[in-house]
């Protein structure tokens, strides 16, 4: 194979990555975009085994493959772990899987950079050393930070911000140590400072994510994803791989754009998301809220209310994913439509645990795309909505985001279901949402609570509605 052909194959893989991102921009083309991306990744993996190096006279020659057995063994192990994990993971656990895969990507890029640095030794140029330092720092931060986001999402540790006295100074000091050690590595060219740099970067990744509250973790996942993309691009420079530079730049750029959009959806700056816990005012403890009366109802009560409605808006949340009730929701919506009732789904940008979580979940049930309305589209219609059904969502409809300065979600744009004539909440219990704060909307006189598993409750509502 000539070097030109090798480069063209790499270019084809890069084009696949670009088309994949374009396809993932809308639900209608997301499946095709994902498939194109998978094809590009396969091409990018296989073409490495055919790598050829150009000669000064314009010819090219193939380089010998070393440790082929180890390479194929690593690929087999990766497939043995990755394929079952991706196929068996529940939609409710998809954000955790994304966090782990993202962290592994950052860690792998850092390890590759370290190995390449050890291989180059004193022959490394200043530019290569700087690229190596950047890859190690950002890759290690992405790895350890992603592990913390996984622990928070899996609720293996508290989802609340973790802060301690002098925490901001510890974070600043660790960052200063990382920067100082980076300069040491560039000037001294030693293995020991590089290992110290990797350790400090891992520590900074942990400290970087700890102050972030549970509701903001999806934003941090997106940011760390952008970090991983940057490390891949930098490692592409170290390895002289144009394909890695293309892929890493695409991931870094798209992750950065997504992070900015999510921060805007949460109604706060990125700095406030990451470090707002250090300046947030402590909330006063509520007294006796657990004894406040709420209006609960039965499936028959909900069915009667829906039967006489003219417009119904369904607001899906994480509880819908937990109950795997998307098909039952679709059945309910179709039944309402058959009765001449207008039905729409109100989708918050950060509903669930990651962007697009609800869109993917409802797509599994073949919910028509035209029924999915984004927040800006659906909010003006709540005033003309007879019934808003909130299924497992809490924080994205919580009025505290508009009325309670100092609470973890204050300033976040919400779905304004409080403007609907009637509100139905499907909940397992009165437990607060992921942000850990009470929702005053539950105590509103026009709110009816239907307790129980969402899928079981909706099935009973559908049966009662059919009987009317």
Image: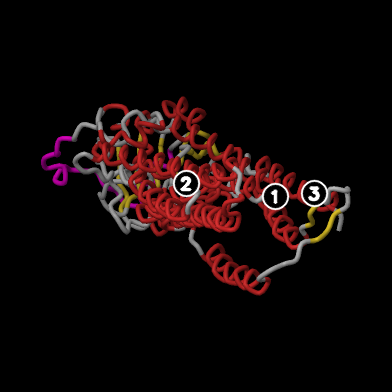
Q: Nearer the viewer, residue 265 or 443?
A: 265
Which residues are the magenta region?
283-308
Left or right for 358, reference 69: left
Of pointers 2 and 1, the one earlier in the residue sequence: 1
| Residue at position x 31%, y 33% in the image | 276
- Residue 300: image location, x then y, percent: 36, 51
Q: Marks 3 and 2, how far apart in space?
A: 36 Å
Secondary structure found at label 2: helix
**Residue ID for mark 3:** 7
Q: Earlier in the sequence, mark 3 or mark 2?
A: 3
> Residue 255, how many percent across, how many down?
54, 40
Q: Nearer the viewer, mark 3 or mark 2?
A: 2
Tell me, yes or no, if residue 167 can be seen here.
yes
Task: Pick the residue in front: 278 or 90.
Answer: 278
The Cα atoms of the two marked residues, 2 and 1, are separated by: 49 Å
Q: Is residue 288 in the magenta section?
A: yes
Examine the rendering and report whether any part of residue 463 can be seen.
Answer: no
Residue lying at 35% horizontally and 31% vertically, measured from the top left: 272
Badge nearest the viewer, 2 or 1: 2
Question: Above or below — where is 281 with respect to 113?
Answer: above
Q: Which residue is mark 1?
A: 32
311 is within the stretch colored magenta = no
For this orientation, the residue located farthest to the left is 287
* Lower position in the chain sequence, tag 3 or tag 1: 3
Percent across and percent down for residue 358 are 50, 46
Q: How many marks?
A: 3
Q: Which quadrant is home to the N terminus?
A: bottom right
Residue at image location 37% in from the left, 52% down from the top: 148
Q: Residues within 10 Å of mark 3 (few under 14, many from 20)?
A: some
- The reply to whether the C-beta atoms of the residues labelled 3 and 1 are less than 8 Å apart is no
């Amino acid at each position: 194979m000539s070097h030109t052909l090798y480069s063209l194959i790499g270019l084809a893989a890069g084009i696949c990555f670009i088309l994949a991102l374009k396809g993932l921009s809308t639900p209608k083309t997301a499946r095709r975009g994902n498939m194109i991306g998978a094809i590009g990744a396969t091409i990018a993996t296989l073409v490495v085994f055919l790598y050829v190096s150009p000669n000064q006279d314009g010819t090219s020659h193939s380089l010998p493959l070393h440790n082929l057995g180890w390479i194929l063994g690593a690929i087999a192990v990766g497939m043995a772990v990755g394929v079952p994990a991706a196929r068996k993971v529940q939609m409710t656990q998809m954000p955790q899987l994304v966090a782990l895969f993202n962290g592994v990507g950052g860690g792998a890029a850092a390890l590759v950079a370290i190995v390449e640095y050890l291989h180059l030794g004193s022959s490394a140029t200043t530019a290569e050393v700087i690229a190596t330092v950047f890859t190690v720092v950002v890759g290690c931060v992405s790895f350890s930070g992603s592990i913390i986001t996984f622990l928070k999402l899996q609720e293996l540790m508290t989802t609340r911000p973790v802060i301690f006295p002098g925490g901001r100074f510890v974070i600043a000091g660790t960052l200063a140590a990382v920067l100082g050690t980076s300069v040491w590595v560039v000037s001294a060219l030693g293995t020991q400072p590089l290992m110290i740099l990797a350790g400090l970067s891992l520590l900074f990744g942990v400290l970087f994510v700890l102050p972030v509250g549970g509701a903001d973790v999806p934003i941090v996942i997106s940011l760390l994803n952008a970090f991983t993309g940057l490390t891949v691009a930098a490692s592409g420079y170290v390895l002289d791989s144009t394909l890695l530079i293309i892929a890493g730049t695409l991931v870094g750029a798209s992750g950065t754009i997504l992070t900015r959009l999510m921060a805007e959806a949460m109604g706060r700056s990125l700095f406030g998301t990451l470090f707002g816990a250090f300046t947030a005012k402590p909330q006063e403890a509520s007294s006796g809220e657990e004894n406040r009366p709420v209006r609960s109802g039965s499936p028959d009560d909900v069915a009667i209310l829906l039967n006489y409605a003219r417009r119904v808006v369904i607001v899906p949340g994480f509880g819908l994913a937990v109950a795997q009730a998307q098909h039952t929701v679709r059945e309910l919506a179709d039944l309402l439509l058959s009765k001449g009732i207008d039905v729409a789904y109100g989708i918050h940008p950060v509903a669930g645990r990651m962007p697009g979580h609800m869109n993917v979940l409802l797509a599994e049930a073949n919910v028509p795309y035209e029924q999915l309305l984004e927040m800006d589209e659906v909010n003006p219609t709540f005033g003309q909505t007879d019934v808003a059904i909130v299924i497992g969502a809490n924080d994205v409809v919580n009025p505290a985001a508009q009325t309670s300065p100092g609470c973890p979600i204050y300033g976040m744009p919400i779905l304004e279901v409080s403007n609907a004539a009637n509100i139905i909440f499907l909940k397992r219990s009165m437990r607060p949402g992921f942000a850990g704060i009470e929702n005053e909307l539950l105590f509103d006189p026009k709110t009816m609570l239907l307790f129980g598993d969402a899928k079981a409750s909706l099935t009973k509502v559908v049966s009662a509605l059919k009987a009317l």
